[in-house]
Amino acid sequence: MSKTYDVIVIGSGTAATTVAKRVSAAGRSVAVTDFRPYGGTCALRGCDPKKMLIGGTSAADHARRMRGKGVEADVQIDWRDLLEFKRGFTDPVPGKKEKSFSESGIATFHGRARFVGPNSVEVEGETLEAKHIVLATGAEPMKLGIPGEEHLIDNEGFLEMESLPRRIVLVGGGYIAAEFSHIAARAGAEVTILQHGERMLKGFDPDLVEWLMEKYDEIGVTLHTNTEVERVEKTGDTFRITTGGEGGSKTFEADLVVHAAGRKPDFAALDLEAGGVELQEGKLVLNEYLQSTSNPAVYAAGDTAQMGPPLTPVSNHDGKVVAANLLEGNHSTPNYDGVPSVAFTLPPLARVGLDEAEAREQGLKFRMQSDRTPGWFSTRQQAESVSGYKVLVEEGSEPGRLRESVKSYAKPTPVTRTARGEGCRRALTDQ
């Protein structure tokens, strides 16, 4: 005998929680299911645990930068203690999350969900039916399609390492490679990044990324761009990575190889075909309301929807949109304009709005102000060696606010608000 609900939410992360809590609060019956511990990627396998590790490495890094400026202690990272510090945050999350769902009157299930009909899924042999089903399953590391791929660990494996290997190779050049390399190098590992593209962090302004690369050199991270990983072999406790690309064939040896080459939803286990949910080129076919065009009973949010940037605030935003449409009929659409993004390197790299290339591609007329900022108070107070900003202001868009915007960068905390008219776009590294 099946159980029936108004809404079934598959997933338990940010997007799933937002939908489930809002719909339940409106008096609808809701069920949540997840085959992983409750909490989602951000809280358990991504943003938050990463920041816990950065908390320790950034403290040590600041102390080292202050050496000779009043601080004399030789600060080192104890990886095991830092891991326990991280676990002090992550370990309680699943229990707290499930308790929170139960206290909100939301039914909870554990196990992989798969469609068995347009309005029904099966979880561990139990059939659940609903008027609507929300897909909020997050993303997984994408397949690399190379021999020896099984030897790579993913972000989850990195964040659970019991000890820090001496030599680490990261495959990829996005957020994960950028952030994990800074953590590992400052904790004492020899770090190499293999990136198939011509530069790292393609979502950020290339000028600012180039400034940040000075920090990679300073902390001893080796970067190889235009490099394709062809295979990974394991011999005893050592891995050999063979690459090709513009520089020809090369080999690298490491004690650990990390998959940092991107993530995307894995829909295989959901059996979308049985639910009448259409995919095109690996993406759900959704309308402007985040609703499946082939099965109107199904909605998607967050990384599963792949409509906005893969960021936690975007997942929360999508969840609000889906909840509003479930409760009041389709009327709410997502808006991803001006979403800020930060790579939590040390120093961090941030952006909001269009970068220079995007503004030029759109034919916008703008003024640009860009500079390195070694003399700013925040830079000197932190004894930092790399900092700067880039501001773009579209002509006719309240240019008087530019002075306020630039002045605000002197604050010691990251600036993400948009101090502009509709046309002002900016990006910065540190401040």
Image (spheres, grey):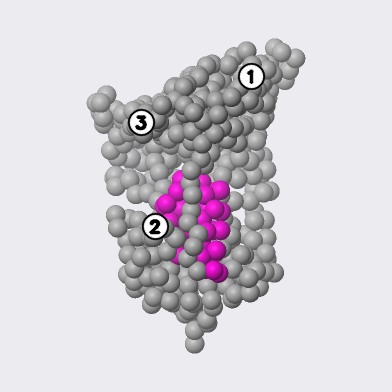
Q: Circle 2 — which element?
A: loop
| Residue type, numbered disc 1 | Thr
Query: Residue 346 appears at what percent x and percent y?
Result: 57, 28
Q: Quick one: 333 or 252, which is closer to the camera?
A: 333
Around disc 3, counting alpha carbons within 10 Å, would you say few (fewer than 14), some (14 to 19), or many (20 or more)? few
Q: Quick one: 285 or 44, which is closer to the camera?
A: 285
Q: Which residues are magenta?
A: 299-328
Q: Which residue is mark 1?
A: 379
Answer whether residue 351 is visible to the viewer in this image.
Answer: no
Marks 1 and 3 sit apart, C-alpha to C-alpha, by: 34 Å
Picture quarter with the C terminus:
top right
Which mark is in front, 2 or 3? Answer: 3
Marks 2 and 3 sit apart, C-alpha to C-alpha, by: 37 Å
Q: Which mark is residue 363?
A: 3
Q: Circle 3 — which element?
A: loop
What is the residue that sits farthest to the front in this orientation? 396
Residue located 64% across and 16% down the image: 376
| Residue type, numbered disc 3 | Gly
Q: Which residue is mark 2?
A: 266
Around disc 2, counting alpha carbons within 10 Å, would you say few (fewer than 14), some (14 to 19), or many (20 or more)? some
Left or right: 399 with respect to 277? right
